[in-house]
Amino acid sequence: METLIKMPVGQLVAKDYRTAEIFSSYGIDFCCKGDRTLEEVCDKKNIKIEEILENLNEILSKKVNNPLDYQSWPLDLLVDYIEKTHHHYVEEKIPVIIQYVTKLCKVHGERHPELIVINELFTDAAGELTQHMKKEEIILFPFIKRMVKTLRQDDAVPLPHFGTVVNPISMMMKEHDNEGERFRKIAALSSNYTPPADGCTTYRVAFSMLKEFEENLHLHIHLENNILFPKAIEMETKIMEKTNVSS
């Protein structure tokens, strides 16, 4: 129990993604702010730590058939999975959600001005995420794959123009923080994606899609911040140590 209390929430979710459901139910950010320990989070949010520990222990004690153990995946496989699953999802859903939210603004914007702000926030997120993913696909992800190949084949890895993998990772994590904050605002403005009493079917569908988009983004950021990025930094360190020993 003491181990769980002192463990960063991001690491807890990385070890078993089922815990993400519990953290989400308490409004705990396990992706962008996953470096905080469970003890720190509970103290800041005034959550009874005994209560959340009971829930965590209950879910951790249950066996799962064929769970997705992202921690054990080779980094090139994880990179491909993130790109083909989460990047594809973002690209596919953005135009659909923009269409729905724009329609909501036209029909309900006068009575619900918060929709105008939600539309602006999501449109900004769409542009930033599109650029963010392209930077990963063109710069960071290929370098991580090159490092994996280097260790497998005992090749030399070319020195990247960005110096060390820590530099683009730091930038990506900062951009993740920005998107996390943006979606916290969207969730607050939408009463956690709860349509008003006079909300039509379009209202309900739009809010449902926004909620699903945020949940997908949480897993997307979690896989990068808490698994891919730390392992990439560790891999670069191993390669540098190996290079220094052989030179």
Image (cartoon, rainbow, N blue to C red):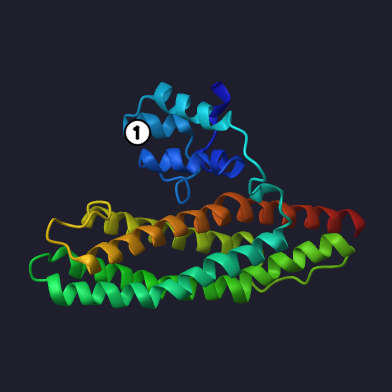
Q: Residue at x 51, y 27 (%)?
A: 58
Residue at the (13%, 56%) spot, across then down: 197
- Looking at the image, which residue is at 82% across and 64% down? 150
Q: How far from the left and from the top, in percent, is residue 112?
A: 12, 64
**Extreme-front residue of the structure:** 201
147 up-or-down from 39: above or below: below
| 64 to the left or right of 35 | right
Task: Tell me the quarter of the image containing the C terminus.
Answer: bottom right
Q: Disc 1 on helix, strand or loop?
A: helix
Q: Nearer the viewer, residue 65 or 207?
A: 65
Look at the image and tell me in which quarter the N terminus lies: top right
Q: Specify few, some or many for label 1: CA neighbours under 10 Å numbering under 14, 14-19, or 20 or more.
A: few
Q: Residue 64 at what x, y percent from top left? A: 62, 39
Q: What residue occupies the far right of the structure in this picture? A: 246
* Residue 213, quarter of picture: bottom left
Q: Nearer the viewer, residue 171 or 146?
A: 146
User: Disc 1 marks which residue?
Assistant: 44
Q: What's the amino acid at mark 1? A: Lys
Left or right of 20: which side holds 197?
left
Residue 135, percent from left and from top: 55, 74
The outermost residue toward the left is 111
Query: Measured from the top left, where is residue 200 in percent x and y?
Result: 18, 65
| In the image: residue 236, left or right of residue 99 | right
